[in-house]
Every structure is written in structure tokens, then in C-alpha cells.
Amino acid sequence: MKKLFAIFGDPVSHSRSPLMHNCVFKNLNYKACYIRVHLKDGSRLKNTFFNLGLSGANVTVPHKEAAFMACDEVRGFASKVGVVNTLINENGKLIGYNTDADGFMFAIEEFGEIKNILLIGAGGTAKALVSRFIEDNIKVDVLNRGEKRLSYFKDLNCTCHTWDGFKTKKYDLVVNTTSAGLKDEELPAPQDIMEDILNNTSFVADAIYGKLTPFLKLAKKKNIIYKDGADMLLGQGVLANELFVNHALQKEDIKIWMQHSFRLS
């Protein structure tokens, strides 16, 4: 019997996850199928998951914190950060994991040693990444539009800023975790702030993939080495697939076929 997996998000039509996971399942002869589920209300995630008879799922913006709340049990790094992007049906119980942070560390390896990062945004992805950076003794500043969501990062002893009164320092890497540029042509912060930030960094990364966001366009214009979220997507996808198949497939095989899916239209 074929297992069914899905990705939940709003929006979700842009997601490459079905192509990635289905490419693995098909080429490694694993009896499973992966679909998109457009979910507007995160509080309906658990009911929707079980009503669809899913064996597992990925969760993207804006439901990663709602996914944490929906779980019967949360394991590993996800329990530390309160953010879940991978769900497993384990004997009728919803088990939550987070593969985003390790996926991102995989993505920025080629930048070499990173000692300090400015992270823009304060949502679920930001929480996971900042906690992971701190584990690696990387100094983190967090910039968000307003004060409201910054308490989590202050508790981690991050230097926190709002747009008002922000003063730029030198950064090795600037990371956008906001949805700015996903469905619009917005920058993650006002133009003058972004110009100043990008004049003071060596590298730039955006969690959004599949399009050159205004943030990345500005970096390109300034000849800064940049990455979109494709490698992060690949890294977290390999780890999620391992969980989906309960390690029945080899990680290297999963990675090969996921990379192959990026070459498909």
C-alpha cells in the first residue's frame, strides 16, 4: 500500500517539495506519493493531517509554530526551539522534528568560517536558525520590524533591533527569513536600512528559493556573493525524507535523487 505525504503552507503552490520527494520515491522504488495542501488556518493542521491519512508531512510558512502546538510529541532540536517543519505519523501519534536548521548549515558551508550574522525576521524559521547558530558559537543580531516577537531572541542573549534607530555593524553574513519577496516585490526592511546593511556584509542568504527576490537583486547589484534557499531546501529535504522512510533508504541515495529533481522543470 502506498504511503501519502504532503506539505502544508500558505502559500504552497510554489513549493518544490513534491517534485523533490516524489523523485526520490519513484527512482528508489519506495511506494509513496507526496502532495501539496494549501492550509490557511494552522489550527486545523492536525485534523487535516489525519483526515488525509498521511504518513508524514512538511510544514512551511506560516504554520511551523502551529505545527509544534499540534504535535503529541516533539523530538530533538525542534523541542528546543518550539518550531516544527517535519511531521511523522507514528502509530496514530503526531511526532514533530525540525530539519530547517541543519539544512541551512549545509547551505552556508561554502561561505567558510562565519563568526557573526545579522538575521532579519522573527518567525519560526528565524527561531530555528538563530538557536542553531548559537550552538555553533556564532554571534547573532536579529532585526525585526517591531519589538513584539523579539523576546525569544533576547532570552538567547542575541542583540535585538527594530527598524527604528537601527545602526549597522559589519557582518560576515546577512540572512533574510521573512516572506518579503515571496509573493511581492518588497524588501525585508526599508530601502535605506537594506542599502546600509548590504554595504557592510560579505555574504547574503535568503530562505526563499526559486526566485531572485528584491533582497537578492540588491545584493547582486552590489556584487555580494549570495544564495537563495535552494540548498537549504535540499539539506532539510534529505533529512526529512530519511524520517519519512524511517531510514529505509540511504542518505546519499536520497541526496542524489533530490539534487536530480532540481534539474527537472
Image (spheres, grey):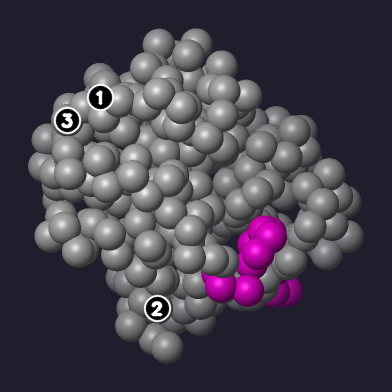
- Relative to 55, residue 13 above or below: below
Span of residues in magenta: 1-15
Mark closest to the chain's N terminus, 1 or 2:
1
| Foreground pick, 254 / 219 | 219
Rate crowding at label 3 as few (under 14), some (14 to 19) or many (20 or more) other CA atoms within 10 Å.
some
Q: Is residue 65 left or right of residue 227?
A: right
| Foreground pick, 57 / 120 | 120
- Relative to 176, residue 128 above or below: above
> Circle 3 sits on which residue?
170
- Mark 2 vs mark 3, CA separation in Å: 37 Å
The disc labelled 3 sits on which kind of residue? Lys
Query: Which circle, 2 or 3, is nearer the viewer?
Result: 3
> Circle 1 sits on which residue?
138
Q: Is residue 137 left or right of residue 265?
A: left
Instruction: Give the secondary structure at mark 3.
Output: loop
Could you tell me which residue is drawn at 26 percent across and 21 percent down?
A: 139
Mark closest to the chain's N terminus, 2 or 3:
3
> Circle 2 sits on which residue?
261
Query: In the rendered image, is residue 75 in sight?
Result: no
